[in-house]
Amino acid sequence: MAYCRWSDNNGYCDVYVNGDLKRGWTTRVATKRHPEGRPLDDLNTIKKHRGDPRKALEKSIEARTACEAWEKENPKIPIAHKDAGAKFKHSTPSECADNLERLKSEGFGIPQHTIDQLREEALWYETWGNGLPEGSQ
């Protein structure tokens, strides 16, 4: 299950976080990011026009075209941080959330909802365990 993707926060997410109960939680940190000023992408545009599918499609195509043009003129820039390009493996959602909070405090773009979701799951995990039969990890 993916908790956040590179495309979250209109493409300003610097991590890809996924997890499952057997293999744990993994954070991959980007090596490059978009410079400031990226126009809203098509997904954000679709959400604005949910009630009108035709308008949503039309505006989505316009937004995607504008985004692609902007990206050609504004290439991604390297992230100057020791953890850029790193991959972190965690055995619990709490460990993953702690690491994300650290990365966020050091300037990485990380959606708060990702940390919040991991904290909620940590409560369940710490109370009930992973729910897998013993020895299946």
Image (cartoon, grey):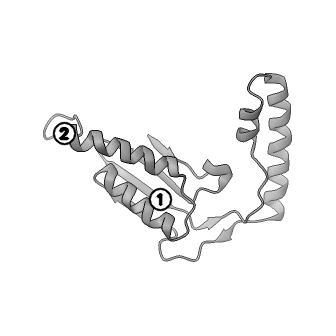
In the image, residue 128 sits, relative to residue 54, either above or below, namely below
Q: Looking at the picture, tell me which residue is in the foreground, 56 or 65.
A: 56
Q: In this view, does 14 lie to the left or right of 10?
A: left
Left or right: 70, with 88 as reference point: right
Q: Which residue is drawn at 32% across and 53% down?
A: 94
Residue carrying label 2: 136
| Residue 119 in the image, given as x and y percentages of width and height | 37, 47
Give the vertical position of 117 relative to 101 (above or below). Answer: above
Q: Image quarter for residue 34? A: bottom right
**Badge 1 density bin: few <14, some 14–19, many ≥20, Cα 10 Å:** some
User: Where is residue 21 drawn, in percent x and y?
Assistant: 30, 41
- Which amino acid type is shown beneath numbered disc 1? Arg
Q: Which amino acid does label 2 sit on?
A: Ser
Q: Is residue 135 left or right of residue 112?
A: left
Please report the residue visible at 86 percent of the width from the left and 32 percent of the height from the top: 58
Q: Is mark 2 on a helix, strand or loop?
A: loop
Residue 86's mark? none
Foreground pick, 57 / 48 = 48
Q: Residue at x 78, y 58 (%)?
A: 71
In which quadrant is the N terminus drawn?
Answer: top left
Instruction: Classify 52 as above or below 68.
Output: above
Which numbered dot is residue 28?
A: 1
